[in-house]
Amino acid sequence: HGILLTANATELTLLGYRQDEYLGHRVSEFMTPASQKAFETRFAIFLYTGKVRNFDFDFVHKNGTVIPVLVSGDVERDEEGKFVAIRSTMVDNREGKKKQQQIADMQEELSRRAEAAEAATRAKSTFLANMSHEIRTPMNAIMGMAYIVMKSDLTLRQRGYIQKIQQSSQHLLGIIND
């Protein structure tokens, strides 16, 4: 029924209890409410399978500190296969939880940075589209006016100037299109 029959000194030290305070109680009494609910569900599965590895529970130290632990256990049976007891081990998982939190924090930061990069890319694309339009309109006007002027009577010198305007306009339009 999950009642503690024995405990080693390491477990008692981890949780801050003396044997007389710990033994004889249900193990779930030393868990947080969320872990108590998880324990009730997992305990039934454990009794059925007879084996569990690295179940994550939060225990409450005698001083009120929450200690994450990993619990592994095996059902012990007699020669006839009848249930005798459960043998389990508890491993302090504070360091593992700290690392998991660090990883989660880094993933969140990466997500924020990726979002910021995507926003910057969208802003750049919008800016370039707007600038392209704003530059293309006057460039088309320059090219159109140069074309009209080329059809008029020009001196050889004036024709050279207008040709340079047309070539430069075509070059700039190519850059804008790219």
Image (cartoon, helix red, strand yellow):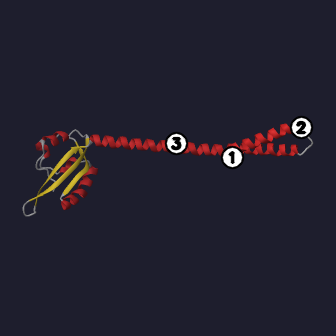
| Residue situated in front as seen by the camera: 10 or 62 | 10
Which mark is nearer the camera, 2 or 1? Answer: 2
Q: Which residue is mark 1?
A: 177
Instruction: Name the residue furthest bottom.
Output: 80
Q: Earlier in the sequence, mark 3 or mark 2?
A: 3
Which mark is nearer the camera, 1 or 3? Answer: 1
Around disc 1, counting alpha carbons within 10 Å, would you say few (fewer than 14), some (14 to 19), or many (20 or more)?
A: few
| Residue situated in front as seen by the camera: 141 or 44 | 141
* Helix, strand or loop status at disc 2: helix
**Position of residue 58 in the picture relative to residue 79 (left or right):** right
Question: Is any part of residue 28 visible from this angle?
Answer: no
Quadrant in which residue 109 is drawn: top left
Report the Cα–Cα distance between label 2 and label 1: 31 Å
What residue type is disc 2 on?
A: Leu
Q: Verify CB contact (< 8 Å) between mark 3 and mark 2.
A: no
x, y percent for residue 93: 26, 43
Residue under the image location 25 percent in, 58 percent down: 41
Instruction: Name the residue furthest front.
Output: 156
Q: Which residue is mark 2?
A: 156
| Residue situated in front as seen by the camera: 48 or 145 | 145
* Helix, strand or loop status at disc 3: helix
Quadrant containing the C terminus in the rendered view: top right
Q: Which residue is mark 3?
A: 116
Which mark is nearer the camera, 3 or 2? Answer: 2
**Position of residue 127 in the picture relative to residue 27 (left or right):** right
Residue under the image location 29 percent in, 42 percent down: 96
x, y percent for residue 138: 77, 43
Report the Cα–Cα distance between label 1 and label 3: 27 Å
Report the Cα–Cα distance between label 3 and label 2: 56 Å
x, y percent for residue 89: 17, 48
